Image (cartoon, rainbow, N blue to C red):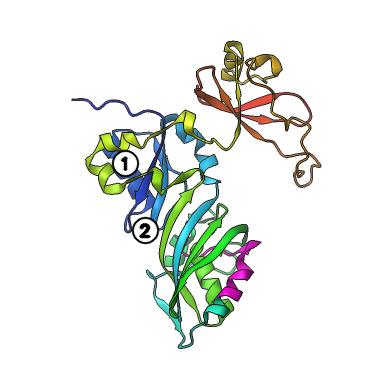
C-alpha cells in the first residue's frame, strides 16, 4: 500500500552518536517516504541532540532555521589536544597539569560575548570549492587556505560540573559557532590543552529536545514521527506576522509589494516599518530589513516578506504557495 504523503513542515530528530547529519536525512527520507528533505545545521558524528529536518516546501525556510541560535551541553577534557579538536582525533600534545575550578571559571569569562573564532581544520567549511576536512585529510591545507576566523557571539556560557580532569559546560551561541574550537581554545588559555569529548545540542532556534523524536523511533514508527511534526504555520513563530486579505494573498503569490490595503482588518503594518529605531546596515546608513510572516485568514503560512524603511510596503521574498 502506498504511503500517505507527508506534509510540509519540520520534524525534529534527536540524533544519536555515530551517524552524520546527512545519514539522518537519508534515513528520514526512507522512513517517511519523502524526497524533498534537508537538515538545518550540521552535527558532527560524535554529537547528539536536536537536528531539525525541513520537509517539502519548508526546505525554502531552511536558511532561517540554520541561522538561529543554538544551545549545547559539552564535556571538555583537559591535558590533551587532538588534530580534530575532539576525542575522534589523534593526540597531538599531552600535559600533566590540570586547571582548578577558579582558573576554569576565570578562563571561560574570556569566551562570553562577541569575538572572532577560527573554525577547526577538520570541518565542513568550504574553501575554494572543497570541504576543509577533505583538504586536511589530504594534507593540502596551507596557511593561506585554512578556515578564516569568523565573528561569533556566546550569549551564555556556564560550568555545570567540574571534576578536576573534565568540565561539563552549558552554552547558548550564535550560528556558525564551533564547540570543538571553544574546547581547544580553553585549553590554550589555561595552558593545559583540552579537547571535546561529548556534545549534545539541546536547542536549535525554537526547537528543543521536548519537540524531538528519537532516531530509532523514526526508523520503526512513522506514525510516532507524525505526532511530533510541526506544520508550516508553526515555524518561525519568533517573527512578527500579518494576516492578508484574499486579494493580498494573490498579490503575495505573484511577488507584488504589499501595503496596508492588502492586510486583513484585524492586522496592521508592523510597527518597525519604517519608524523603529534599529541598528543600521554596515555602509548604508539604513535600517536592516525585517522578516515578516505572511498568513492567510485561516492562519496558513504563505511566505515571508521583508520590510523596507524607505516605504510603507512589504516585499514578499519567500513565497510558499
Q: Position of residue 46 (x, y in %)?
A: 37, 61
Question: Is 201 contained in the magenta span?
Answer: no
Q: Quadrant of residue 277?
A: top right
Q: Mark 2 highlights which residue? A: 45
Q: Residue furthest right?
A: 285
Give the camera-side residue of 279 and 316: 279
Q: Residue furthest left?
A: 1
Residues in magenta?
Answer: 105-124
Image position of 311 (left or right of 105) = right
N-terminal-most mark, 1 or 2: 1
- Residue 263 got which mark? none
The residue tagged 1 is: 28
Helix, strand or loop at label 2? It is loop
**Badge count:** 2
Vertical placement of residue 14 versus 266, above or below: below
Give the class, few, some or many, for how many residues have Cα within 10 Å of label 1's Cα (few <14, many ≥20). many
Question: Quick check: can you spot residue 318?
Answer: no
Where's residue 288, x and y in %? 72, 39
Residue 150 image point, x, y percent: 62, 59
Amino acid at each position: 500500500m502506498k504511503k500517505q504523503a507527508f506534509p510540509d513542515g519540520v520534524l525534529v530528530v534527536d540524533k544519536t552518536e555515530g551517524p552524520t547529519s546527512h545519514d539522518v536525512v537519508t534515513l528520514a527520507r526512507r522512513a517517511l517516504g519523502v524526497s524533498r528533505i534537508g537538515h538545518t545545521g550540521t552535527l558532527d558524528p560524535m554529537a547528539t541532540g536536536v537536528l531539525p529536518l525541513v520537509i517539502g516546501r519548508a526546505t525554502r525556510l531552511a536558511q532561517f532555521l540554520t541561522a538561529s541560535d543554538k544551545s549545547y551541553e559539552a564535556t571538555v577534557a583537559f591535558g590533551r589536544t587532538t588534530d580534530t579538536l575532539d576525542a575522534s582525533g589523534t593526540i597531538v600534545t599531552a600535559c600533566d597539569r590540570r586547571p582548578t575550578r577558579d582558573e576554569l571559571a576565570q578562563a571561560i569569562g574570556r569566551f562570553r560575548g562577541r569575538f572572532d573564532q577560527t573554525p577547526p581544520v577538520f570541518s565542513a567549511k568550504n574553501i575554494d570549492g572543497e570541504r576543509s576536512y577533505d583538504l586536511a585529510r589530504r594534507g593540502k591545507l596551507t596557511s593561506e587556505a585554512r578556515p578564516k576566523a569568523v565573528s561569533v557571539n556566546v550569549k551564555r556560557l556556564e560550568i555545570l560540573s567540574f571534576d578536576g580532569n573534565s568540565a561539563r559546560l552549558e552554552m547558548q551561541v550564535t550560528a556558525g559557532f564551533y564547540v570543538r574550537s571553544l574546547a581547544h581554545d580553553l585549553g590554550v588559555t589555561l595552558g593545559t590543552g583540552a579537547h571535546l569529548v561529548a556534545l549534545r545540542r539541546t536547542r536549535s532556534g525554537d526547537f528543543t529536545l521536548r519537540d524531538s523524536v528519537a532516531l530509532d523511533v523514526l526508523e520503526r514508527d512513522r506514525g510516532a514521527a507524525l505526532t511530533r511534526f510541526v506544520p508550516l504555520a508553526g515555524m518561525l513563530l519568533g517573527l512578527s506576522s500579518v494576516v492578508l486579505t484574499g486579494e493580498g494573498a494573490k498579490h503575495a503569490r505573484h511577488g507584488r509589494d504589499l501595503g496596508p490595503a492588502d492586510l486583513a482588518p484585524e492586522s496592521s503594518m508592523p510597527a518597525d516599518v519604517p519608524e523603529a529605531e534599529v541598528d543600521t546596515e554596515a555602509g548604508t546608513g539604513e535600517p536592516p530589513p525585517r522578516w515578516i510572516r505572511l498568513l492567510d485568514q485561516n492562519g496558513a503560512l504563505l511566505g515571508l516578506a521583508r520590510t523596507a524603511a524607505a516605504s510603507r510596503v512589504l516585499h514578499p521574498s519567500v513565497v510558499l504557495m
